[in-house]
Amino acid sequence: MNNTKVSNNDAYIAGKVSTAPQKTHQVEGEWFYEFKVEVDRLSKTPDFIPVTISERTLKNQINVGDSVNFKGEFRSYNKQDAVKNKLVLYFFAKNYMTMDEIQAFNNENVNTVKLTGFICKQPIFRQTPFGREICDVVIAVNRTNSNKSDYIPCIVWGRNAKFVADKPVGTKVEFEGRIQSREYKKANETETKTAYEISCKTVNVIENKLEESDEISNAI
């Protein structure tokens, strides 16, 4: 019998370190560092991706401007402040990519994520001022060998957006895309904030409440 568990969360990034690694917290004697990696899109617009890595994985010191390549998971946690809980999203680096893995992507600026999870809030369908169709979806992704789940906001485009817009909470889906950083300001606020989400190019509905199966992909 094959007892190998399939991962619900596979993420890969390769780019340049844009902020100096900072030692931020310790878990059972193991220190973790945080920093950001700059990865260019095809349009050359950069995404700045927050990375968390164990000192045991990091091994050697890295500096701003260094080229790095990691495989891991895109995760979340709730950070409580004086007013409310904030969902914090980050790339958890589990290991460095091998040369074979890097070459398989055929792109030095790698940024790809594949998630399998459950729709946990009713999707929100909308249109941009230019008429482009978008659907905002939040999915719960169970961590392998853990009782924790990561809650990941995703943006789905075009006919994929229409396809997923009416899927009920609890529908099991598979999304593939890239980690996107986006700056924004809330109304009546001067502070610029950064949101992180998955910009999806492939959507697959694995199972819904009616136990039907359907799929649609590559709609961008």
Image (cartoon, rainbow, N blue to C red):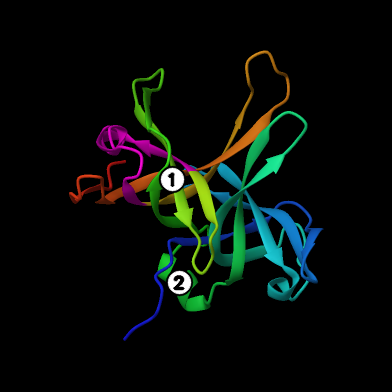
Q: How many residues crowd around disc 2 within 10 Å: few (fewer than 14), some, or many (20 or more)?
A: few
**Residue placed at 70% from the left, 63% from the top?**
66
Secondary structure, mark 1, is strand
Could you give the CA–CA distance between mark 2 and mark 1, rounded to whole angstroms? 30 Å
Q: Is residue 177 left or right of residue 148?
A: left
Establish if 212 lies above or below 144. Answer: above
Q: 54 and 50: which one is in front?
A: 54
Q: Which of the 4 image quarters holds residue 192?
A: top right
Q: 156 and 146: which one is in front?
A: 146
Q: Is residue 35 left or right of residue 118?
A: right
Point out the image quarter for the N terminus: bottom left
The residue indicated by pointer 2 is: 103
Q: 21 and 210: which one is in front?
A: 210
Total numbered circles: 2
Q: Is residue 96 left or right of residue 112?
A: right
Amino acid on which disc 1 is placed: Ile
Q: Residue furthest bottom?
A: 1
The residue indicated by pointer 1 is: 139
* Residue 199 in picture, x, y percent from top left: 44, 43
Establish if 132 lies above or below 182. Answer: above
**Residue placed at 73% from the left, 24% from the top?**
191
Q: Is residue 171 magenta?
A: yes
Amino acid on which disc 2 is placed: Gln
Secondary structure, mark 2, is helix
* Residue 28 in picture, x, y percent from top left: 77, 70
Q: 4 and 13: which one is in front?
A: 4
The numbered mark at residue 83 is: none
Q: Which of the 4 image quarters holds residue 61?
A: bottom right
Residue range highlighted in magenta: 153-174
Q: Is residue 145 magenta?
A: no
* Residue 193 in picture, x, y percent from top left: 67, 31
